[in-house]
Image (cartoon, rainbow, N blue to C red):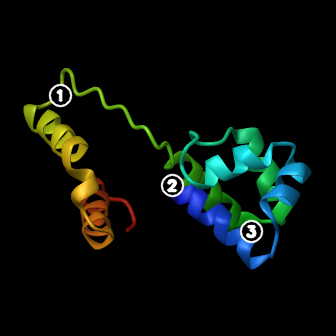
Amino acid sequence: MTPFGEKLRTLRSERRVSQKDMAAAIGVSAAYLSALEHGRRGAPTWTLIQKIIGYFNIIWDDAEELARLAEASHPRVKLDTSGLNPAATELANLLAENIEKLDEAELRRITASIRAALGRRP
């Protein structure tokens, strides 16, 4: 599941909306919505994000958060480290080869560390 898929499922659950009903309302298939929630589809388009925001009547910061989650929800990430420091290539390969071995707490710690190094909020 992707961060966007997790949030979408939470929104549906909180509002007691079925995938079938939501899919019909925003013009996609229930199968697509399911795949989006489970991370089997890439990040949704800007247009679809706007339809979801409208469907749930999400405003301001919550709408921005949903859009940010969508941007961070590509289930198949590709990294090109050519021309970068060798440490960047090592890090990219280490993550690619071992990410499934890390538990949620370790993943959150590493993510927070990288965000801190980039000067972003945790």
Measured in 3D between alpha carbons, the distance from the residue under mark 3 to the one under mark 2, in whole angstroms, is 15 Å
The 10 Å Cα crowd at callout 2, few under 14, some 14 to 19, many 20 or more, is many
Residue at mark 3: 12
Mark 3 against mark 1, which lies toward the viewer? 3
Amino acid type for the residue under numbered disc 3: Arg
Residue 93 locus on image (x, y percent): 18, 38
Measured in 3D between alpha carbons, the distance from the residue under mark 2 to the one under mark 1, in whole angstroms, is 28 Å
Mark 2 against mark 1, which lies toward the viewer? 2
The 10 Å Cα crowd at callout 3, few under 14, some 14 to 19, many 20 or more, is some
Residue 16 locus on image (x, y percent): 80, 75
User: At 22% from the left edge and 46% from the top edge, which residue is drawn?
Assistant: 95
From the viewer's perspective, tell me whether residue 86 is left or right of residue 79. left
The answer to whether 32 is drawn above or below residue 7 in the figure is: above
- In which image quadrant can residue 109 be found? bottom left
Are the two marked residues, 3 and 1, in contact with CB atoms closer than 8 angstroms? no
- In which image quadrant can residue 85 be found? top left
Identify the secondary structure beneath mark 3.
helix
Q: Which mark is residue 84?
A: 1
Amino acid type for the residue under numbered disc 1: Leu
Identify the secondary structure beneath mark 2.
loop
User: At 89% from the left edge and 50% from the top edge, which residue is drawn?
Assistant: 24
Q: Which mark is residue 40?
A: none
Nearer to me, 81 or 14 = 14
Query: Mark 3 or mark 1: which comes first in sequence?
Result: 3
User: At 36% from the left edge and 31% from the top edge, which residue is drawn?
Assistant: 78
Residue at mark 2: 2
The answer to whether 107 is drawn above or below residue 100 in the figure is: below
